[in-house]
Structures are given as C-alpha cells and as structure tokens.
Image (cartoon, rainbow, N blue to C red):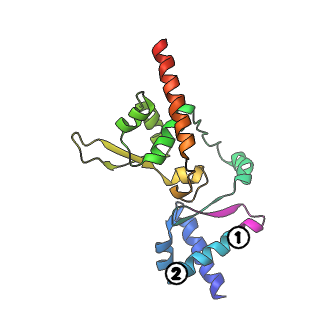
Amino acid sequence: MEIEKLQGAIEAILFTMGDSVELEKIAAAIGHDEETTRKLIHNMMDRYEEESRGIRIIELDHSFQLCTKKEMYEYLIRVAKQPKRYVLTDVLLETLSIIAYKQPVTKLEIEKIRGVKSDHAVNKLVEYGLVEETGRLEAPGRPLLFGTTEEFLRRFSVHSLDELPTLNEEQIEHFKEEAEDEAQLKLDI
C-alpha cells in the first residue's frame, strides 16, 4: 500500500505541475532518495505503457512529465481546438541542429556556419519553444547565447542531449564538401 500511495503522490505532482519536474524535487516531496523515486517512476512508466491508458510519463534530462499518449491526439482534437502544428522547414531544421550541437551559441556563430543571416530562423525557433536565450557571451556587445529547450527534447523524443547522434569524420568531410560545392555554385551564378 505504501508504494501505491507514493506513486499516487508522484502522479498528483506531475499532473498538477503540467511541465516537467526535476527528480530531486519529486524525491524531496515524497520523502525518499532519488534512486528509490526514479525506480517508482520507472515502474509507473512501464505500467502506463502496458495498460491502455491515455497518459504516459516521459523523462527529460533528469526530470519527468506527465503527458498524453500520441495515439490519443485524434480524440483530443475532437474536444479542443486543433493545436497549431508548426512546420519545421529545412532552414529551421538546419539552424536548430547547429544550436543543438554547438550550444550555447550566438547568432553570429550560427551565421558563420550557415553562411547567411539567421535572425528569422532563430526567432521562429524561439517562438516555437524549441530554442531559448541561455545568457550572454562575455565579449564586446555581449551577444545573446541560444540553446535548446525541454520542448526540443520532448518533440524529438530524446531524454537528453547526450542521445543526439554523433557524426563520424567521413560524414563531417562529406558535409564540408557539399557546403563548399554549394558555395561555389552561388559564386558561379
């Protein structure tokens, strides 16, 4: 009975908070250590996935969040207004990937990599909640630094940035060649 009561408390915390809650805060709230709390939450996650329930718990970089299962979307839109679906264009995806791999990064650094102005792309990503300002660079002008958000992790179904794919040297070389060819084409035009 004690386990069920603790899991009920965790469920109530996650439901009420809406956003993700750090493991440390959940553990403190239920009066247990982080390892025990993590095991309780993982047991709940497994149970939610096995049962035909409309909710699930996801883990996001040492935090947990209660959310709706993707399979339930069609039922939700029948009740609520259809949520906005953001379109991630190639430009936005390219900018987002630069930010994800180089964060914290300034707009100038993004523009150096892309070779074009990136104000619009960065602003759109901030608007979509995938990118946020993370501070300022200690340099003249103190330019803004950007990094990814928890929403980025959620949308791309990764628990932490450590799960992002890594590129090997061959892939990097191939991308460099493609970029140089593309730059040469622009010069020829």
Extreme top residue here? 189
Q: CA distance from mark 2 to mark 1?
A: 20 Å
Extreme left residue here? 140
Q: Which residues are magenta?
A: 48-59
Specify whether 101 is left or right of 76.
left
Residue 151 coordinates in the image, percent (x, y): 53, 51
Q: Which residue is mark 2?
A: 30
User: Residue 46's mark?
Assistant: 1
Q: Quadrant of residue 143?
A: top left
User: Residue 110's mark?
Assistant: none
Asked whether 97 or 134 is in front, the reply is: 97
Determine whether the residue tagged by mark 2 lies in a helix, strand or loop: helix
Q: Are marks 2 and 1 in contact (CB under 8 Å)?
A: no
Residue 140 lies in the magenta-colored region: no
Residue 118 coordinates in the image, percent (x, y): 42, 32
Tell me what residue is drawn at x 56 percent, y 52 percent: 164
- Sequence-first disc among 2 and 1: 2
Residue 113 coordinates in the image, percent (x, y): 43, 34
Determine whether the residue tagged by mark 1 lies in a helix, strand or loop: helix
Extreme bottom residue here? 1
Residue type at mark 1 is Asp
Mark 1: give few (<14), some (14-19) or many (20+) Cα within 10 Å. Answer: few
Residue 42 coordinates in the image, percent (x, y): 64, 72
Residue 57 lies in the magenta-colored region: yes
| Badge nearest the viewer, 2 or 1 | 1
Residue type at mark 2 is Ile
